[in-house]
Amino acid sequence: MPEGHTLHRLAKLHDKRFAGGRVRVSSPQGRFAAGAALIDGRVLTRAEAWGKHLLHHYDSGVTLHIHLGLYGKFTESAVPIDAPVGEVRMRLIGAGRTGEAHGTDLRGPAACEILHDPEVAALTARLGPDPLRRDADPDRAFARIQRSQRPIGALLMDQKVLAGVGNVYRAEVLFRQGISPHLAGKSLSRTEWDAMWTDLTELMPIGVRRGKMHVVRPEHDHGAPSYAADRPRTYVYRRVGEPCRVCGTPVLHAVMEARNLFWCPTCQPA
């Protein structure tokens, strides 16, 4: 599932390409036809992201809410755009403030729906602070963490606690801070949380700018390749059984609340 930096990157791209102008919206697949009709021909005023949620705000007062889930994907295209291929839930075409026309097709999202202001407020209210938003309040997340006996490795993935962090950032920030994913939330110190939050607010914007996560410090960015050819190196994510880049201990794997978990037992002692 795309992590928060991907949605913020999309929001910036869509705001640049489409905001400030009228857009044409359709649903070639048909499943979003009623929603598309509500925003077709309207002005997209701005696009933003909250955690893993993408929001397009329109001059009519409604908001398009998109959650990509596991399989959702946008395909950006030049205009004129070719005939739809496959199950295109939504097609959006427009020219924003620059006057240059662009198009984008959305396939396979977990959510693609029209929301009104109270529904948008309810959505954002149930999300934890997003390290990529300037209005984020890390104290809200720490207050929840302090009250919980759940392991910090699970709490970081709970979007009600912290919005936008997924499996990669979870594994890597815990490694970088030397914190065991099995540590109970209530046992996490304020100093540890502040360092973790600062690390996220520095790492995640790199993902927004570059389109890829870069989590390994320069002095450790060598040796074994990444888990995939088109990905930068990681410390522990998807490196089960391989030597830790810092101490050489084999990286461990477990399943925590139905999600794969990776950590170094030496650098992140229980």
Image: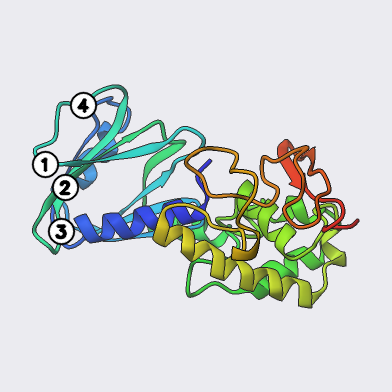
Say whether residue 225 is left or right of residue 24.
Answer: right
Q: Secondary structure at mark 3?
A: loop
Q: CA distance from mark 3 to mark 2?
A: 9 Å
Q: Residues within 10 Å of mark 4 (few under 14, many from 20)?
A: some
**Depth check, front residue: 63 or 174:** 174
At label 3, the amino acid type is: Gly
- Quick check: marks 3 and 2 in contact, CB under 8 Å? no
Quickly name the residue at label 2: 102
Q: Residues within 10 Å of mark 2 (few under 14, many from 20)?
A: many
Point out which mark residue 96 bears.
3
Among all residues in the image, which is located at the extreme front?
223
Image coordinates of residue 225 in percent, x first then y, are 59, 43
What is the three-letter code of the residue carrying label 1? Val
Question: Circle 4 is placed at which residue position?
Answer: 84
Q: Depth check: 129 or 103 in front?
A: 103
Picture coordinates of residue 173, whole percent (x, y): 67, 60
In 3D space, how far apart are the residues under numbered discs 2 and 1 (Cα atoms)?
Answer: 5 Å
